Each structure stands twice: as structure tokens, then as C-alpha cells.
Amino acid sequence: MNQGSKSKVAFIGLGNMGAPMVGNLLKAGVTVNVFDLLPQLAEPLGKLGANVSLSLQEAVTDVDIVITMLPAGEHVRAVYLGDHNGGKGIINLVSEQTFLIDSSTIDPDSARLVASEAHKKGLEFVDAPVSGGVAGAKAGTLTFIVGGTESGFQMAESALCHMGKNIFHAGKAGDGQMAKICNNLLLGVVMSGTCEALSLGVDNGLNPEVLSNIMLQSSGRNWVLELYNPCPGVMEHAPASHQYAPGFMCKLMSKDLGLGLEVAANSQSSVPMGSLARNLYAFHNRNGNAELDFSSLFEYFSVSKRET
Ligand code: NAD
């Protein structure tokens, strides 16, 4: 961080991604206040040295940087701008020097709204969604995709370096979210296709590990096969080998594909593959899988085979 180890950070949202990101800030010697609506998520971070805050206000008072890692646009709008119950948002709770970073994946319009309301208060805000999953969050190797001003990007680079390996400037406010949405639309399509191809092989007598190794050295090679194999037992560390414990929940992948369809409607873009992936996840979620890891879509193909 360019403000050095003296920087004090408030981190809001301690779920599957937020908690390991805080872990890396603490390892780097950064002072971190943590807050989540679920207090039990803050406790283990308190044991690692974080200051556990009992409210949003307590967490963001007298800090240099606020980082949020929340589920969706409505949570981000409420946390920054205030909620319907009269609860104050971050932009009304922090001092003017505080730098604001939202790393959640949300719709670009919400990111632009928060940026513009923050600027009205003299505050710098960037959207900085991430790629790399829980494994990347734990290892400190996330990719951050920043949308905002050049000065905002420079401040973000030095604030995010303890949690990520690659930090890109996608463009103006909201462009980080736009790039992230394109990436996750592709990820949803690639996961669906990889589940389909692996299931086809298994249904026809192939060993999934052998098939995975063949495709990894062939033209079907992709990120899912490299790091996130959806077939149980093929990859020891993948969610598939741990009853699909997330990881990245199906409901969050559905949200991201939905964001892709929304922006496509606005730009009149054709997104047939993303649309199909969104429908596959909608069906899979309705069968009780919304909180499983998104690689559990593999079961959609194997179950439909068993049922025929
Ligand atoms: P999660 O649901 O595990 O965590 C979100 C946390 O935010 C929860 O603990 C929730 O209690 C907390 N929260 C919600 N509203 C709050 C509020 N008002 N105040 C304080 N805390 C609040 O989700 P996650 O998997 O950590 O993902 C977070 C974001 O990162 C999402 O936008 C997701 O799309 C994105 N993302 C996730 C992954 C992944 O692999 N899990 C990868 C890349 C991006």
C-alpha cells in the first residue's frame, strides 16, 4: 500500500471470498477492522488479529481504505448509500480522505451510481471485482479488474497488491464490472460445456481422470479443466471432491449470468451461449443446488442420464 503499513483498512463482507482476502491483509501486517451481518464469520478473523466491529459505522470510522465484498448490487447500494430503514451508508460515515473499493461482482449501473454519489462527497471510489475464486483469494493471487479514474486506479493498485497478482485498469467507473461480467459469462459457458463433455465421456465408459488429462493436452483445454474439475475424485482440491462445498455458489453464477443478459439487452447484443448457461443454472438451482459450488452443474448432466 502506498500509505504503507500505517494504512488502516475496513473490510465489509466476510464470506467465502472476503475472509481469505482479510487473511492476506493481516499476513502483510495491515491493520484491519472487519464487519459482516453474520458475526460468527468475524470471530476467526479476530483470532488472527483483525479488529472485530459490531456495526458498519464502527468498522469504517477512522480508516484510510474501505473494501467491500458483498453478494450483489442491492447489498452494495445499501452499504454505501444507506438502507431503507434509515441506516447510514459508508459515504456518510467516513472522512473525506477515505478511499473506497468495492470488489463484489455487481451490475455496472450500481457501481456508477455509487461512484458518482461518492464523488459528490469528495470521496474516491473504484469498482474492483475479482477473478480467481476462493483458491485465488486464499493464495493472494486474485486478478482485480478496476473501473475508475487513473488516480483511483493507482491508489487501488497499492491497496490491492497484498491480495492479488494481476491488477488491471479496465476503464472508467463501472468498466471493471463490465469486464468481470464478460469474463463470468464465458466461465459459465465453459463450465457448462466442460460438464457436458466429461459426462458424455463417462456415460460412454471413459475414466474421467484419463479423459480430463487428454482434453488438457488437446484443443478442449480450459481453466475449468486446469484448476476446477467438476467431476468428483478427479482433482483432490476442487469443490467436486468435497461434496461441492463452495467455492463459488450456483446462485452467484446465476446472478452473474443474469447480469450478462441484462447488459446484453441494453446493448442489443446477441448472447445465446450465456442465455443457455443461465437457463441450465436456473434449472439446477431450483433442484436445491443454489448454495452448492457452481461446478455441481456436473450433476445436472449425470442425474439427467440416470433418470432416462
Ligand atoms: P458470500 O455470500 O460467501 O459472502 C458475502 C458476505 O456478505 C456474506 O457473509 C454476507 O453475510 C455479507 N453481507 C451481506 N450484506 C451485508 C451487509 N449489509 N453488511 C455486512 N455484510 C453483509 O459470497 P462470496 O462468495 O464471498 O462472494 C462475494 C462477491 O464476490 C459476490 O459478488 C461474488 O459474485 C463475487 N465473487 C465470488 C467468487 C467466489 O469464488 N466465491 C469469485 C469471484 C467473485
Image (tube, helix red, strand yellow):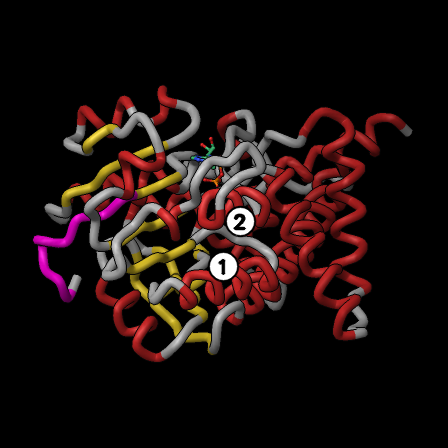
The residue at the far front in this view is 86
Please state the extent of the stretch shown in magenta in the rendering: 2-10
Q: Is residue 191 left or right of residue 236?
A: right
CA distance separating discs 1 and 2: 7 Å
Q: Is residue 20 left or right of residue 89?
A: left
Residue 48's disc is none
Tags 1 and 2 in contact by the CB under 8 Å rule? yes
Q: Nearer the viewer, residue 152 or 259?
A: 152
Residue 65 falls in image quadrant: bottom left
- Going by the numbered disc 1, the residue's amino acid type is Val
Q: Nearer the viewer, residue 160 or 82?
A: 82
Q: Would you place residue 24 above or below residue 263 in this image?
A: above
Q: Residue at x 82, y 27 (%)?
A: 306
Q: Residues within 10 Å of mark 2 (few under 14, many from 20)?
A: some
Q: Is residue 217 left or right of residue 302?
A: left
Image position, residue 244 (x, y; %) = 55, 30
Residue 77's disc is 2
Q: Would you place residue 269 above or below residue 66 in this image?
A: below
Residue 19 falls in image quadrant: top left
